Image (cartoon, rainbow, N blue to C red):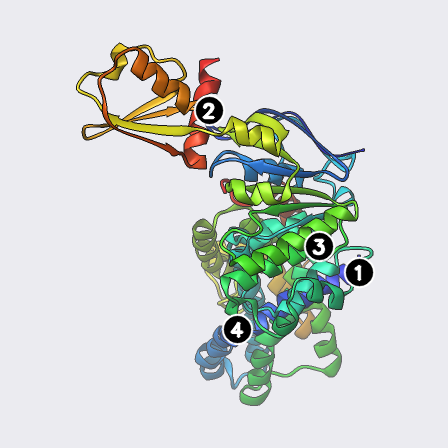
Amino acid sequence: MIHARAEGVTKSFGDTLALDRVDLEVRAGELVGLLGPNGAGKSTLVSLFTGGRRPTAGRVELCGGDPRDPRNRRTLGVTPQETGLPASLRVGEVIDFVRAHFPTPLPKAELVDRFGLGDLVRRQTGGLSGGQKRRLAVALAFAGRPEIVFLDEPTTGLDVEARRDLWEAVRSFHAEGGTVVLTSHYLEEVEALAERVVVIAEGRVLADDSVAAVRGLIKVSRISLSSPVPLTDFDLEGLVAVEQAGDRLHLLTPDADRMVRELVERNVPFRDLEVRPTSLEEAFLVLTGKEHQK
Amino acid sequence: MTSLVLTHAKFQTLELFRIPIAVVGSAFWPAASMLAFVVPFAGDDPVGATYATASMITFAIMNTNLFQYGIGVSEDRAQPWDPFVRTLAAGAAPRFLGRILTGLLMMVVSLAPVVLIAALFTEATLSPLAFLAAIPVCAMIAVPFILMGLSIGYALPQKAALVVAQILFLPLAFGGGLLTPPGGAPGFIEDLAPFLPTGGAVRLMWTTVTDFPFDLTATLALAGWTALFGALAVWAHRRDEGRRFG
């Protein structure tokens, strides 16, 4: 059974193209990570699946119907942005409010217990710490006993223990057969939870594969060196980007060993060679760069 | 459905009353206007004071609803909580109706002082029957202003909503004859007033609490405005997708 489906989905805001012909299927019981840099279109895609927005072109389905129809959202759970919780309401009141929208919600005590909110029930959400707000936000996604949840950066900025607890809660939901779509711009979070990773950048799906395969794909190294000759004279294979900072050149490549070997074989003069792994953000640059070359 | 309406009403009311100054604020202006304009000028004349009180109540109803919904809704839309509520399994109806219940409650809060001041400090008189009749009339004439506020709130961003509500409310009050006794406004306003929502609303109030004759044209015009603002509010709500980016 397909829980969420996007077919040739395009979404534009004025002149800005947020999503460009995206196809995606999430089957029941899957745990999918949507990985991409900020502004890649992840949130826009999620807002289409959760009924917040309409696609400019293409088709979006949630649980077999139009997500804009509230009936198709009865088994949907979503995390609010924790900065947006109504500040003057108490934690318990916010939970009651969300539970009231579902036919068979999780008992309040169970939800509070599962997400460690016991001490906070009487507190106004405006007075919670960032981590506490995040826990409440994630708890709200599970309040209605959903079959599919969309979690937006669920554990970003949490301390290690709180993060483990939340991961545990997500895993146990998944183990009971729940479908999870989680968005993140941290590979670590996606690696910890997801089985399948969909990489999105510049509004397009760049990769849709297992965690291991995507990790290989976005493995990019940075080779730094100083050279008296401009490297643009050499047509180096596997070079995806060059940056210059002072007299230092930074070469980005998926295969550092091969690049170094090639530099040596072709007698490129260089000194002070350094090889380091890159950040995910840089890896995305490389991925999107590759995409352009095709 | 009904319980969901009550849920939305309950939480909106809780949010409002947790910030008491907002409640006090909306009760302050109508009461202050009563004390400043009605008590000293028409307080001794039973007929004049009754008319003026009815006008002031209509003014308060328009004012509370236009601002509460127009600005309240557009503020809410700018909050990241709003897109979340839209993902819950409920259509527009419970939120709309919940808001309207909350608005009616707020109106009671802002009208109570006006009625008290009229009873204590003016010669305004009213039969118990007329008083009871005035309550549903207040609720009824609130509807077009609630819908007008909702249209503004859903159609416009926060700053624009504030400006539009401010620009609208004085011409509506003056043009509808709320600030003058019946027949006391300049001629063109007398001609125009029955066709404005405020004019239709205040005429209904006058008919209820004084021996002002029932004005069918004005009432039909008011019904027309209500339908128009209703359609506009629904359209604006459907079109709205929260903030455009984010």
Q: What whole-number distance in Å separates the C-alpha atoms at marks 3 and 4?
A: 29 Å
Q: What residue type is labelled 1?
A: Thr
The residue at the point 50 percent across, 41 percent down is: A185
Q: What element carries label 1?
A: helix
Q: What residue type is labelled 2?
A: Thr
Residue holding disc 3:
A142
Give the letter of the chain under mark 2.
Answer: A
The residue at the point 19 percent across, 28 percent down is: A247
Q: Is residue B219 visible?
A: no
Q: What whole-number distance in Å separates the C-alpha atoms at marks 1 and 4?
A: 26 Å
Where is residue A128 drawn, in percent x and y? Answer: 53, 67
Q: Tell me, for residue A38, which label it has, or none.
A: none
Of the numbered discs 1 and 4, the one sitting upstream in the chain is 1
Q: Nearer the viewer, mark 3 or mark 4?
A: 3
Residue holding disc 2:
A288
Where is residue B76 drawn, in percent x and y? Answer: 54, 56
> Nearest the camera: A20 or B227?
A20
| Numbered disc total | 4
Q: Which amino acid does label 4 sit on?
A: Ile
Contact check, label 2 and label 3, Cβ < 8 Å = no
Q: Can residue B244 be seen in this view?
A: yes
Q: Which amino acid does label 3 sit on?
A: Phe
Where is residue B91 drawn, in percent x and y? Answer: 72, 48
Of the numbered discs 2 and 3, the one sitting upstream in the chain is 3
Residue B183, above or below A219: below
The residue at the point 49 percent across, 40 percent down is: B245
Q: Do the residues at discs 2 and 3 belong to one chain?
A: yes
| Crowd around label 4: few <14 · some 14–19 · many ≥20 (10 Å) | few
Q: Do the residues at discs 1 and 3 belong to one chain?
A: no
Where is residue B50 drawn, in percent x and y? Answer: 59, 78
Q: Tell me, for residue B2, which label it has, or none.
A: 1
